[in-house]
Image (cartoon, rainbow, N blue to C red):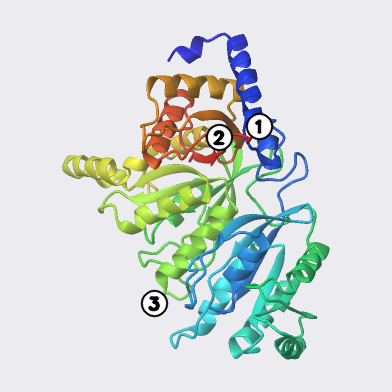
Amino acid sequence: MTSVTRPPADDDALDRALRAGLADFELTDEDRALVDGLAPDESGAAGTGPVPVVAIVGRPNVGKSTLVNRILRRREAVVEDVPGVTRDRVSYDAEWAGRRFTVVDTGGWSIDATGIHLRVAEQAEVAVDLADVVVFVVDAKVGATDDDEAVVKLLRRAGKPVILVANKADDERTETDALTLWNLGLGEPYAVSALHGRGSGDFLDRLLEVLPATSAVAGDRPVEGGPRRVALIGRPNVGKSSLLNKLAGTTRVVVDDLAGTTRDPVDELIELGGRPWIFVDTAGIRRRVHQTKGADFYASLRTQTALEKAEVAIVLIDAESSITEQDIRVVQQVIDSGRALVLAFNKWDLLDAERRYYLEREIEREFVQVSWAPRVNISARTGRHTDRLVPALEVALDSWDQRIPTARLNAFLGEVVAAHPHPVRGGKQPRILFATQASTRPPRFVIFATGFIEAGYRRFLERKLREMFGFEGSPIELSVRVREKRKR
């Protein structure tokens, strides 16, 4: 496109004009910081490291999501008066008294005759392992249950700061009932009504007292010059352990035709392409091989754990069998986590011409939304083409780290919009006022506009961004902020 040859001076002039034009619109302090390029990215202010992580844990229907919304001061987490609405761990950016941190809303646990202790341990261990501080929520009206006491033992062993919240303390009588929770041995119970806000300020002040300045667990940003972290994920029995062993040059993890033989994720420092990489093998889907119930539950938790500690994911897919819904779900999990992505089709050496033909059609159909992901056809058993993984990983990570200068971004979007304007809806046509890249890892773009930009046009803009700037192997997040003109 012509924007490649535009003189930088023209781009800078356009940028200054667009910034000046924003003065006519209602902007928040956060908006102005973004426009001025001062907003910190997801790791916190420059040089301070990743923001601390707070996990909200507890039984179903004790009000965890309501408490999350109270902390965020906006309705983000789904709240419903039905146990188990939150099924996965969901992260949100939060701030209190000028301190930034990440809140992780976790699914609760429920009594299951086939394995309550396994379920409780899995959910609590994952949440606690990835947090700097744990907020343990108990229903003040119900009091401590056997499930609560089981989790208390895990929290004590973890050795991390724990704040006990007695939620649903809507009146003075319930506040008095909450005092009985001292018996749990976790210190002072903070009586809170997450629904009405009662006591939430005292609880948040206490949270800041135990919150570290930077996270000790967030692993998505390596030490400068250190090895990059790779999550090796995929559905059971696609060859993850075999690939890890081949890359490591040794039998590091047990390999068996029976799915789920690896019990815990294994970190392995491996040298590839003349540089070190840290691989996390997540072959373990179930804690017990005979435990079939809840396999998806464990798979999701293990995969999410690896992703939160990784920068890029290799999704391994069995080329011999048809692409499954679980394969697609794992790929989507990588995208939702904001990690870079490489697709690796294993057992390629075992395919005949007919299977390769039909597989290509399946890939075109099932992965049409991730055509931007690098793809490598390998054999974990023989090592065929595993050397191609490094270039694919490097391309994906470079895209994940890529930042587009604001002036160039606006010049490019101006040309795109001029050639293909947003459709008129209801007699109105939204106008893009300004765009900026808010952060990297993954690239996040914020567009200021005079009206709502529909999903189809957002996808069009993302496609154009990829055509111009690449972003091969990295998801892109594009958000729109609708701003109105100042009232004279």
Q: Quadrant of the C terminus?
A: top right
Q: Specify which label sits upstream in the sequence, 3 or 2.
A: 3
Q: Is residue 433 left or right of residue 372?
A: right
Q: Is residue 290 left or right of residue 469?
A: left
Give how far across and how far down residue 441 sits, in percent.
58, 41
Measured Cα–Cα span from mark 3 to mark 2: 47 Å
Q: Which residue, given by chain and number where applicable, does mark 2 sit on? A: 448
Residue count near mark 2 (Cα–Cα under 10 Å), binned few <14, some 14–19, many ≥20: many
Q: Residue at x 49, y 59 (%)?
A: 303
Single out the mark in the foreground, 3 or 2. 2
- Asked which secondary structure carries label 3, the reply is loop
The answer to which image quadrant residue 23 occupies is: top right
Q: Residue at x 57, y 38 (%)?
A: 483
Give how far across and how far down residue 379 sits, in percent.
36, 45
Q: Residue at x 39, y 33 (%)?
A: 460
Q: Are marks 3 and 1 in contact (CB under 8 Å)?
A: no
Q: Which residue, given by chain and number where applicable, does mark 1 sit on? A: 35
Q: Are marks 1 and 2 in contact (CB under 8 Å)?
A: yes
Q: Amino acid at mark 2?
A: Phe
The answer to which image quadrant residue 296 occupies is: bottom left
Measured Cα–Cα span from mark 1 to mark 2: 10 Å
Measured Cα–Cα span from mark 3 to mark 1: 50 Å
Q: Residue at x 71, y 43 (%)?
A: 223
Q: Amino acid at mark 3?
A: Lys
Q: Specify which label sits upstream in the sequence, 1 or 2.
A: 1
Q: Which residue, given by chain and number where applicable, does mark 3 sit on? A: 293
Give how far across and how far down residue 5 sits, in percent.
50, 9
Residue 182 visible in this rendered orientation of the protein: yes
> Does residue 196 sit above or below 385 in this rendering?
below
Q: Quadrant of the N terminus?
A: top left
- Asked which secondary structure carries label 2, the reply is strand
